[in-house]
């Protein structure tokens, strides 16, 4: 069928299911794909610059990430974040463990403060206090939230690219316009 790339995620447990299926962790899925298909697929995995919400510690989270790479992953896409220091520290931490694969930062355009806060609370992505307070200050002014969000996320993207990020992965949530606007700002 021509498929050559796979994003291998353990994923969240579906509502109503009491336990995971055959693969309890993403590294197991990566190992299975490698054993079954060799190097046919380019495999990407998830990375969490601010720590996976179920990890017991930053150290444990780094070890889990390293295990996915050792199982055969070629690259990673991060959870979205708004703190470039967290991304660059994560890169430094995994490189010190011998991992040197492309780790593409995940970018979430800001179009709604309530949606962003709800998503972030559920997935463990940190919203810096300054950003949270600024968003709260806009109240229900959607136009101002979108304009502010465009500036913040454009600046975040520029900082990441200037710092050596290998690209950007946008979580568009089926809304192309905010992502297109950011890309236009990046020139």
Image: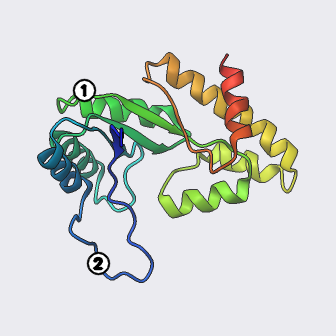
Q: Dot 2: what SS?
A: loop
**Residue located farthest toward the front when viewing the structure as drawn:** 1
Residue receiving disc 1:
100
User: Cα distance, mark 2 to mark 1?
Assistant: 33 Å
- Left or right: 44 as drawn, with respect to 135: left
Q: Count the marks.
A: 2
Place of residue 97 in the rendered image (x, y in percent of width and height, measured from the top left): 18, 33
Compared to 172, does 167 lie above or below?
Answer: above
Q: Which mark is residue 25?
A: none
Front residue of 49 and 21: 21
Residue highlighted by disc 2: 19
User: In the depicted view, which residue is nearer to us: 30 or 122?
Assistant: 30
Position of residue 30 in the picture relative to residue 104 (left or right): left
In the rendered image, which quarter contains the C terminus? top right
Residue at screen point 74% across, 38% down: 177
- Furthest-left residue in this view: 35
- SS at circle 1: loop
Q: Looking at this view, is 153 or 25 the one in front?
A: 25
**Image position, residue 18 (x, y; %):** 32, 82
Residue at the location (32% across, 59% down)? 10
Q: How is the image coloured?
A: rainbow
Sequence-wise first label, 2 or 1: 2
- Quadrant of the image occupied by residue 1: top left
Residue at 86% across, 56% down = 140
Q: Is residue 22 left or right of residue 113?
A: left
Q: Is residue 87 above or below residue 127?
A: above
Relative to 21, does residue 89 appear above or below in the rendering? Answer: above
At label 1, counting other C-alpha atoms closer than 10 Å, the crowd grade (few under 14, some 14-19, many 20 or more) is some
Could you say where residue 38 lies in the image, as x and y percent from the top left?
Answer: 15, 39
């Amino acid at each position: 069928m021509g498929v050559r790339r796979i994003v291998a995620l353990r994923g969240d447990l579906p509502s109503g299911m009491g336990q995971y299926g055959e693969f309890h962790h993403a590294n197991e899925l990566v190992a299975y794909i490698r054993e079954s298909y060799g190097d046919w697929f380019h495999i990407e995995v998830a990375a969490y610059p601010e720590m996976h919400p179920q990890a017991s510690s930053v150290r444990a989270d780094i070890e889990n990430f390293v295990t996915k790479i050792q199982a055969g992953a070629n690259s990673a896409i991060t959870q979205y974040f708004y703190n470039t220091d967290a991304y660059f520290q994560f890169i430094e931490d995994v490189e010190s463990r011998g991992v040197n694969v492309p780790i593409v930062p995940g970018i979430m355009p800001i179009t709604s403060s309530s949606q962003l806060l709800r998503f972030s609370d559920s997935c463990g992505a940190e919203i810096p206090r300054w950003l949270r307070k600024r968003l709260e200050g806009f109240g229900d002014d959607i136009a101002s939230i979108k304009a502010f969000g465009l500036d913040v996320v454009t600046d975040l993207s520029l900082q990441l690219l200037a710092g050596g990020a290998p690209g950007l992965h946008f979580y568009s949530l089926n809304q192309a316009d905010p992502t297109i606007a950011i890309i236009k700002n990046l020139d």
